[in-house]
Image (cartoon, helix red, strand yellow):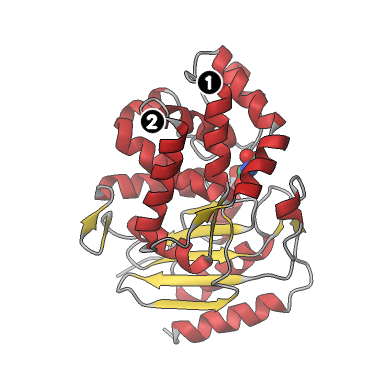
Amino acid sequence: MPDLGAIIAEIAAEIQAETERGTVASYIPPLASVPVGKFGVAVVMADGAVHAAGDADEAFSIQSISKVFALTLALGAVGDQLWNRVGREPSGSAFNSIVQLETEHGIPRNPFINAGAIVVCDVLLGRLQPREAIGQMLRFVRELAGDDDTIRIDDAVARAEQETGFRNMALANYMRAFGNIHGEVELVLGTYFHFCALAMSCRQLAMAGRFLMGDGRVEGHRVVTARRARRINALMMSCGHYDNSGDFAYRIGLPGKSGVGGGILAVAPGIASIAVWSPGLNKEGNSHLGQLALERLVHRTGWSVFEPRG
Ligand SMILES: NC(=O)CC[C@H](N)C(=O)O
């Protein structure tokens, strides 16, 4: 295989030259003001080598990528009981859709749509106060990334989410009516919005994803079991990009999770943890150029999980 550092640099240069960049999320000012020209990529290999290019060290709002870390914490807290309250099927609808909740009695399709992640937060609050759950999340992500204290929660983003989160409030209240939210809706959403407001760079995000590329251990320290890592990857493959998940699997063929900040975390099992960031989104709310960069990376490296091996 050609030199990975060269491939990444080449892709970063190609992406910078693209003119169709998608549309930056505009529902809150702190996201709307991010320049559409930003692009970063970081790849952490199984042996620890890191390759990065572009704006790989600039922090951005990870938004729904936090749903992966929240799910991991909730599975750690309650194990398979979580699946009594959240499904494991792709939704085929938008990340903030309410439409399935009525016929499916308040049980969200999966933990990676907003409704599912809100239930995941409620599960975490079964044992912790919001402040504790937010602190636990921040510590967890910092520890996964091997970061001391530079990863933070952007309070301006959390506040803006809170001020404009009418759909999320509707989702949470609707699920509460079905008995699938147990805590106070405001506290559950406050926690959810703070998770969405985590700010980190591509390099930090790719580091934080390391626990999903192998047997669940990072530098000898067990984060999850190997089986749980596989299962989280399966959910990322089938549900990580909302109603764009099938197309992401088709084009890229890696477990991945996107956020409306324009980031994507993708995992090449046994090989690498990858983070890309470009704030312009496609119509499903996933990074337009982030997907293109991943498509090119997978094409040039043969890292798709559907690539025959051996
Ligand atoms: N897809 C996303 O990243 C959505 C997160 C966003 N904060 C919301 O709750 O609507």
Furthest residue in direction left, as rendered: 220
Say which of 53 and 61 sits in front: 61
Residue 145 quadrant:
bottom left
Residue 69 location (% of width, % of height) = 43, 47
Cβ of mark 1 under 8 A from ligand 1: no
- Look at the numbered disc 1 and give the secondary structure of its residue: loop
Kindly identify the residue that appears in the image at 62 percent across and 17 percent down: 102
Q: Quadrant of the N terminus?
A: bottom left
Report how far apart the C-alphas of labels 2 and 1 lie in the structure. Answer: 13 Å
Q: In which quarter of the image is the C terminus?
A: bottom left
Say which of 78 and 190 sits in front: 190
- The amino acid on which the numbered mark 1 sits, given as a three-letter code, is Glu
The residue singled out by tag 1 in the image is 184
- The amino acid on which the numbered mark 2 sits, given as a three-letter code, is Leu
Say which of 61 and 110 sits in front: 61
Q: Is residue 243 visible?
A: no
Report crowding for label 2: few under 14, some 14 to 19, many 20 or more residues within 10 A (C-alpha): few
Residue 162 location (% of width, % of height) = 66, 36
- In the picture shown, does residue 88 fall above or below 303? above
Residue 181 lies left or right of residue 173; in this view the side is left
> Looking at the image, in which quadrant does ligand 1 appear?
top right
Residue 181 location (% of width, % of height) = 50, 20
Residue 44 quadrant:
bottom left
Label of residue 128 in the image: 2
Cβ of mark 2 under 8 A from ligand 1: no
Kindly identify the residue that appears in the image at 30 percent across and 44 percent down: 228
- In the picture shown, does residue 164 fall above or below 173? below
Residue 259 location (% of width, % of height) = 60, 51
